[in-house]
Image: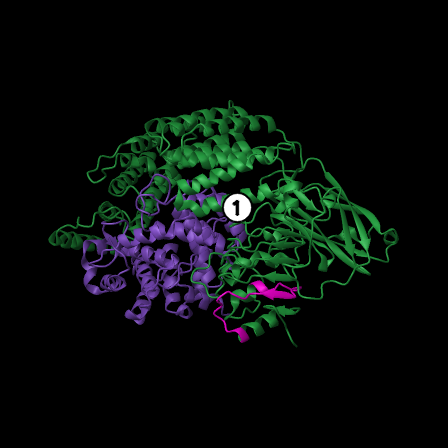
Chain colours: A purple, B green
Amino acid sequence: MADKLVADKHLRYILNLMAEKKKESFESVVMDHLRMNGAYWGLTTLSLLDKLGSVSEDEVVSWVMTCQHESGGFAGNTGHDPHVLYTLSAVQILALFDKLNILDVEKVSNYIAGLQNEDGSFSGDIWGEVDTRFSYIAICCLSILKCLDKINVKKAVDYIVSCKNLDGGFGCSPGAESHAGQIFCCVGALAITGNLHRVDKDLLGWWLCERQDYESGGLNGRPEKLPDVCYSWWVLSSLIMIDRVHWIEKAKLVKFILDSQDMDNGGISDRPSYTVDIFHTYFGVAGLSLLEYPGVKTIDPAYALPVHVINRILFTK
Amino acid sequence: MHGRGRNEASKPEETAAKALELRSLQSQFMSNHHQKIYTQEAIQLSAKLLGINPEAYTAWNYRKLALVSRINDDSDPSLVNSIIDEELGVVKKALDRNPKSYEAWYHRKWVLSKKGHYYTSLENELQLLNDYQKQQLVNDYQKQDDRKHDNLRNFHAWNYRRFVVELTETSAEDELQYTNMINDICFSIYSAWHYRSVLVSSLVAKKADGFMPKETIRRELDYVHNAIFTDEVKQSGWFYYYLWLLDQTLKMETPLRFSSWPSDGSIITTFCSESGSFPLILYFDQAVSGVNSSTVTIDSELQGHEDLVWEPVSDNKNSQVDSCVWVAHLKFDSREPCFSRNEYKVKVSLGGIVSSMGCNLSTPYEFVFTVLHTVGESSQQGIVSWTDGFDNWDDAQSKDLNSLIALDADAGFEWRKKAIKIEIDHLRNLPDSKFGKLILARLLMAEETMISDDAVKGFHYTEILQLYNDLIALDSWHAQYYKDEHSVALLHKVTSSTKSMSRHLFRYRKMNNIVCLRLNNLTLSRIAAVEKLLFVQMLDLSHNELHSAEGLEAMQLLCCLNLSHNRIRSFSALDSLRHLKQLRVLNVSHNHIRGENPVDTTRYLCSSPLSNSGEVGREVPCKYWDVYLVLRDFMEMKQFDIRGNDLIFSGEEFSSFVRQVVPKLVWLDGHKLTN
């Protein structure tokens, strides 16, 4: 069993993924369309391990810009259609490199603001899928770009609150069941807009702390499901934003994340002895960051970017 | 990405070949998409691509464009049907590959929303969904028995179900029957219990036949007992029972309750030579809006009370904001005629206030208090001590504690009380069960608030505190949660009667004998019962385990606060104190405030540029931002103590910053400041 974070191995794992030679494996081709997300996961992990300098900033930034569509939104990779999911990742990547100034902020923010619906909800793209994930994305992205006033914040917040369930959690739309991923999105959006008083922190905090599995120490996303490292982020960041993180057993969660590492090849998986991927590597490291694991920089629980990046953006005019 | 064993990787030659095939498909598809080619061949290519890679979202977009290019409102119905069939077929293949593909489920929904009314096989949709959900998985690596019902846990399918139910106008009663069927298959499907709560809520709200609140709750309670008392390990039934059913039983038709300072029948004393004001504090147990001078009217001999400005105790001062605590300041001037008598009455009437849960005050509520005016002694000159200069509380002066008063008659009181009693008996008979004990503790707390008879009030607290101690031993991972609950119960116990409170009450001689409440050394990790403490002016919470000042904002009369020797880790944790406009003395010495936080758990609970709240545009100094955001509102602060905190800032620089931000500061860290 693991007793420490093998940061060097994870660094090598990420750099390999981002390099040319890995691009022709089946796994890589099948993920082609979400490379923008993958890049955000990989680069943020590097930043948390203080190794962002290991990649070529120019190469990454110029590739990101090739993914911008004429509508202002970004696609998952060059040539694909735009969607808010990738637009946020693109903005986050530029924020990591302190390169937000190369953006036509008006264009990007208009793309996002244009996707708000009458009831305050957000569609992911022109095809109209509505989900509170997109509410979070819009609010997070516009806040980073300092254009939050382009949307109707009150309606956006009211829509999110209409997705609140009787267990204190949130679903993807009104009536949908609570799920830790959706909860992170809704709590994050409410946090960024200064509306956490609309969350019943005790009720939700208890539901969230009950996600911890007694056998493994890991967290699941909803009752009766298996624990998974990605919930170390979704559940943990939510608990931190509402100041209830002291309700879980942190040491056991650290152990679960560390045990899910591939100690030989690097990378972190969804649970011990399963296949690693960049998604879980990021969430594992981000989780450890929130658990104050030594050697990992602090990540902001609402914006999902390192604290020093967010402070730099939001505390300067 | 999820659920693949680490050593399951396939042979390299196989993956290289598959990769090449997919790469070629993808580039052909992209070419068709960019050139807007929607021939049969091109469309079939996209289907092939999606069969291998259901998450290639651009291909789903393409198919939508292709559909729109082939059919319009005048198209032949049989053509429309065959195209819909084709689309649903592609979705089905994609879902066989990945039943959790957002894009695939949405495509199905998009097609049917657009053309569903043309679709002759629409009524099959629900049946197909039922078949999918009830199908049991038999996979090699899913050894656990429970995983075979994972189709029932697929939330995409449940969300899609709600869409189909709406499209086909299926009744809520029928859907409730369906959840009964699901529960018969497996009691631990949270999705089914959640759906049940949504269905039952809507049937009760619609006042459907057979769904009046009382009979529905009784029926559901009996139904749920089967699920939870027989198999305690599975959580889902417990969550339905506790979080929804009992919540409904307790909260349904509950009137709004409130407490105030001054309270009904009380006598308050003002000290001043010429003029001043005193606060009028209203505390509601549900957040309310619309508190203003038309909904809350004052009848008194004082001039100028018609224009009273009510403000919520929150950062947003808009009167439409929902807040539990509201404050107004009643001004007086000694030149007014009523002052010659040194005593006058004030009558307050509440009406027309709406709570966030929809409670409406049907009849106005009035309360009256008396104001005594005395020529004042000069206010505090010397440094305030927390150890010397205190007199014991004179029982003869005992106030009636402000318990929460119900603002309307309690309609459903009796049946709710009975239902709770029955559940308490059931839970007491369960063997050692974590959920059983926790819910029992909660129900006993709820019963306490329902009791109005002073003779039996406070009876349950010993049992409640014991239950939380048992839980800490039984479930150590959640110890901090049970500790917080224990603190809440303890505070309610201490404040449950005048007798128990008076042991903690004192008067501070040096400040006109103001009321001091001592709650130190009680291992408190959380603040509660504040509605009963509105009259407290000096509060000692030292030597406890508090990590946040959350809850103290309601105590609007507070002028001296001692939080020393607690577990406060950041300035943002003190944010609630910004609302205490009378605060003059604050001691936060011997905590864990470093000034630079690895992880700040109260970062988003205070207003700052990060949460787009507070005064936008006001220049915030970068270096001490979290210090500044808290201290900037301490306009009356004279005495501040932050020793023993391991602050990362150097003494001199920090002191000078504090002096800049807190204009009236006289004593810092025990020393008098020189000019």
Q: Position of residue B200 (x, y in %)?
A: 47, 30
Residue at numbered disc 1: B487
Q: Nearer the viewer, residue A274 or B180?
A: A274
Quarter where residue A99 is shown:
bottom left
Residue, x 47% and y 40% (percent of image)? Answer: B468
The answer to whether residue B634 is magenta is yes
Judging from the image, mark 1 belongs to the subunit labelled B
The crowd level at tag 1 (other Cα within 10 Å; few <14, some 14-19, many 20+) is: many
Q: Is residue A227 left or right of residue B592?
A: left
Q: Position of residue B216 (x, y in %)?
A: 50, 26
Q: Nearer the viewer, residue B47 or A83?
A: A83
Quarter where residue A212 is shown:
top left
User: Which quarter of the image is occupied by the C terminus of chain B?
Assistant: bottom right
The answer to whether residue A214 is magenta is no
Task: Find the magenta span and give its range.
Answer: B630-652
Disc 1 on helix, strand or loop? helix
Q: Please say if B406 is above or below B511.
A: above
Q: Is residue A27 left or right of residue B427?
A: left
Q: Is residue A170 left or right of residue B83?
A: right
Q: Please say if B224 is above or below B652.
A: above
Q: Amino acid at mark 1?
A: Ser
Visible residue check, residue B117: no
Question: Residue reaching furthest left?
Answer: B13
Visible residue check, residue A273: yes
